[in-house]
Image (cartoon, rainbow, N blue to C red):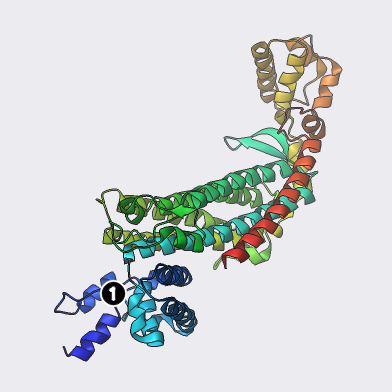
Amino acid sequence: MGPSVRRENEMKKLWGGRFKAELHETAKRFSYSLVVDHELLGADIKVSMAHALMLGKVGIISEREAKSLVKGLWRVLASIKKKTLCDLLHDYEDIHTLIQSELEKKVGKLARKLHTGRSRNDLVTTSTRIYLKEKITTVLETLNQFQSALVTQAEKNRNIMIPGYTHLQRAQVVLLSHLLLAYVEMLERDKSRLLDAQKRMNECPLGSGALAGSSLPLNRGYVSKLLGFDRPTANSLDAVSDRDYVIEVISSISIVFMHLSRFCEDLILWNSQEFGFIALDDQYSTGSSLMPHKKNPDMLELIRGKSGEVYGNLMSVLVTMKGLPLAYNRDMQEDKRSLFASLRILLDTLTVLNGTVRTIRVDQAACEQASKDSFLFATDLLEYLVKKKVPFLEAHQIVGALVRHALDSHTTLGGLPFEIYQKYSRVFKKDVFDLFDPRVSISSKVSLGSPKPELVVKQIRLWKERLKAEAKRLKQAHHRGQ
C-alpha cells in the first residue's frame, strides 16, 4: 500500500497509525455503523461546533481557527445532506469519520485539530443526548396531538353511553367520553416519563475523553452551556460507559406502546360485528384478498404487533449492557439501532393512530342498545340498598340472589316483578325500577373521577385548555432546539 493510498484511507477513519494492514472488507461490513448513526449528523455537527469554539476560547487553537472550523462544519452539514447515503456506507466507518473526512476537504489540515481533547467515546454519547433531547420534544408534540384527537372525539360523543367492561364482561354503564379520557390520562403519564428521562440526560459528557478526561485545559462548563445542557457530567468513566438514558427512553416508549396496544384492542373489539359500537374509516382499514365483504382493522393490529418489536428493542439494549465492564466497549454501538428504530416506530404509529381516531364514526344506536342491559345496573341496586342502611355484604348477597333468579327465569333484572324484589328485601320500593336507566346510573355518581356527565364535561374542557397550552410550549421548545 503506497503512502497516498494510506493517507486516503486514514482520512476515512479516526485511527490507524499503529496498523500495518487495512481492515478486511468483511470486517468493514460487519463493524461499520454509518447505516445507523447517520441520524446523528445534525447533533454531531452541533457538538463539533461547540468543541471548536471551546478550543479557541481556551487557546488550544486560535479563535480564527475555531471560526474557520465552525464555518467548515456548516458547509459539511450542507454537503452531506446532498449526498446519497448508500454511496457512503462502505467507505466510512461512522458518522464521526464522515464528518471529519468532509471537513478536511473543506478546510484542509486545520480539520485535524478538531478532534483535540476528545474521543469518539465522549463524542458519540454527547451527540446521542443532543439528538434524544430534541427527538423527545418531537415525540411529546405528537403525543399531544394524539391526546387532542381523543379529547375531540370525547367532546363530539360526550352523551354516548356504552357498557364498561371488566374481564371482558359487561360491568357498569360509562360514558364513551370517560373511557377515551382514561387513555388521555395514561398518555399524560407517558409524557411525564419521557420528560423525566429528558431531564436526567441533560448533562454534557464532552471532555470526558476516552475514559479518563484530558490533561489539556478544556472548559467543559463552556461547552455544556453552548449545547444547552444543565451541567457537565461529574465522572468521566460513567459519562462514556453508561447508556441508562437510552434504556430509559426505550423503556418509556415501551410503556407508551403498552397503552397504545390496549387502546387498539378496545377499538378492534368495538369495531367488530359482535360489538358494533364504532366504524373505522376506509382510509385506515384494508380488505381481504379472498373475502370481498371484509373490512379489517389492520392498522390497529399492526400497532399491537409493533409493540413486540419495541419490547424486543428494550431487551436488546438491556442484554447488551448487562455484562460490560467499565468503560467503553464496542458492544455499545448497537444501542442506537434499537433506539432509533423505537423512536421511528412510535412517531409513525402515533401519526396513523391520530388519523384513525379522528375519522372514527360512533354508532349511537348500537351503544345505547348495549347500555340498556339491566344487569349493568346490579351495582346500582346494591348501592340503593346501602343507602337504605342495609349492610354492604348483606346487600351484595341480596342483589346476587336477584341476579340468579332473573337468569333462572330467563329474564332481566328490570323484567322481574316488584313482588320478587319484595321477596328478597322489604326495603325495596317501586322507585327501584328507576335505576334501570343508563342516564340515571351515570348521573347518580358523585365520587370525583367518575363518569358523571358534569364531571366529564369539565374534564374535557380542562384537557382542551391544557393540551392547547402545552402544544404552544412544545412548539416554542422545538424551534429553540433547531
Q: Secondary structure at mark 1?
A: loop
Q: Amino acid at mark 1?
A: Leu
**Of the pair 224 and 339, the residue shown nearer to us:** 224
**Which residue is at a point 81% across and 37% down the rendered structure image?**
454
Give residue 73's position: percent from left, percent from top. 45, 78
Determine the image quadrant of residue 138: bottom right
Which quarter shows the N terminus?
A: bottom left
Position of 439 relative to 131 (above/below) = above
Q: Which residue is label 1 attached to?
A: 14
Give residue 112's position: percent from left, percent from top. 32, 78
Outermost residue toward the left? 20
Position of 233 relative to 54 (above/below) = above
Determine the image quadrant of residue 400: top right
One can see residue 279 in this view: no
User: 294 left or right of 450?
Assistant: left
Position of 56 relative to 299 (above/below) = below
One can see residue 127 in this view: yes
**Of the pair 243 and 180, the residue shown nearer to us:** 243
**Which residue is at a point 52% across and 60% down the rendered structure image?**
228
**Which residue is at a point 44% across and 83% down the rendered structure image?**
84
**Which residue is at a point 59% across and 56% down the rendered structure image?**
140
